[in-house]
Amino acid sequence: MTPRKAPVHLLWGEDAFLLREAALEIVGPDMQPREIDGAGWQGGETADLATPSLFGERRALVVSDGRALPDEAMRELGTYLAAPDPDAPLVLCATVPERGKAPAALVKLVEHVGTVREVKVARKDLPTWLGRRAKLRRLDLAPDGAAMLVETLGEDPATLDQGLAQLATAFVGQRLTRELVREQFRGLGEQHIWDLCDRAFGRDLPGAMRSLRTLLEARDDPLMILGGIASRLRDLLRVRSLPERMPVAELAKAAGLRFDWQARRFREQAGRFTLEELVELHGQVVEADRALKSGASDEVVLPVLIGRIAGEPVRVG
């Protein structure tokens, strides 16, 4: 690859949270980048990037969901990258499906002037990743505490990072051991349900079934599990009904979500379904609720529902 001549990066991977964290690490702590969603590109973003600020601060631009960049944005980026500003970091992030590859059009755009890098953390590396995150927060996380966090909260990096934040508040100045993690999250199934929903609506059928099995073996209330699925489905319905190019901050507000990263993730998940398919799945959730309350086995009802969500696309009509 041609040596990098400008701070231009294409980051790609399956997890939007990891991509954003990697992008902010590239930009550095002393710079506040402009962050935009690919679908919300307005035009002129590269002109702003190349124009010095009034007070001389360095500029930076981070683009999430680069796969949603419109054609006019790709043309503008192509023109800019012919002579990019050597002092203005530009980071394009592209979230891809499981086992997906970097978007070819973005690779072609960036590879001759900048760097292209996959961002991922394997499950076996999550405790080590958590250890690094803990150091950034100046937390004393024991290795067995990191392992227990993954065991308790699942494999979603954003959820694990939130778990660290909860532990930091609950046990100020203490070494975060396995016992303290277990004490903090004892009896809570919400994190596992979040993982189940991510896998199911990400159409990862084997992973969704593993998550469901973990919940059922832990004797979590099947109606609580179904309630989590129904809640996620309602969020996806709201997101799917909003304009595709709505900026992510506006999307989060309009859909009633607390965080921008939730909007990014739910937009990606909702995009795997048509609005009609999501409506059909809502009807199947209602049927599952009726079946469970009528005494049907959760070990039959819930796997069937998860199979319909995570398996082949629902056929309507």
Image (spheres, helix red, strand yellow):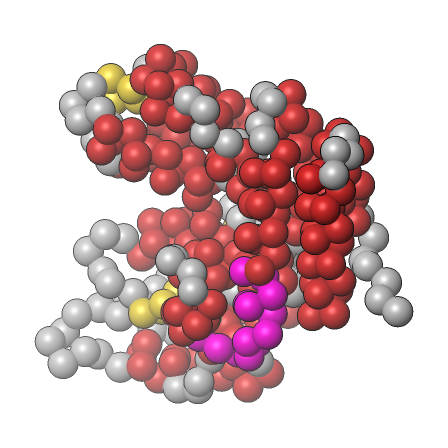
Q: Nearer the viewer, residue 208 or 298?
A: 298
**For residue 26, side relative to residue 208 (left or right):** left
- Placement of the C terminus among the 4 image quadrants: bottom right
Foreground pick, 153 / 104: 153
Q: Quadrant of residue 242?
A: bottom right
Residue 246 magenta-drawn?
A: yes
Mark yes or no: residue 303 visible: no
- In the figure, 180 relative to 267: above or below? above
Q: Is residue 51 magenta?
A: no
Identify which residue is drawn at 83% across, 53% down.
312
Q: Closest to the observer: 170 or 299? A: 299
Can you give x and y, in whole percent of width and height, for residue 277 in the image? Answer: 75, 64
- Quadrant where the image shows the N terminus: bottom right
Which residue corresponds to the image point at 31% horizontal and 57% vertical from the top-left?
A: 27
Which residue is painted at 39% across and 49% down in the image?
A: 21
Magenta segment boundaries in residue numbering: 235-248
Q: Residue furthest right?
A: 317
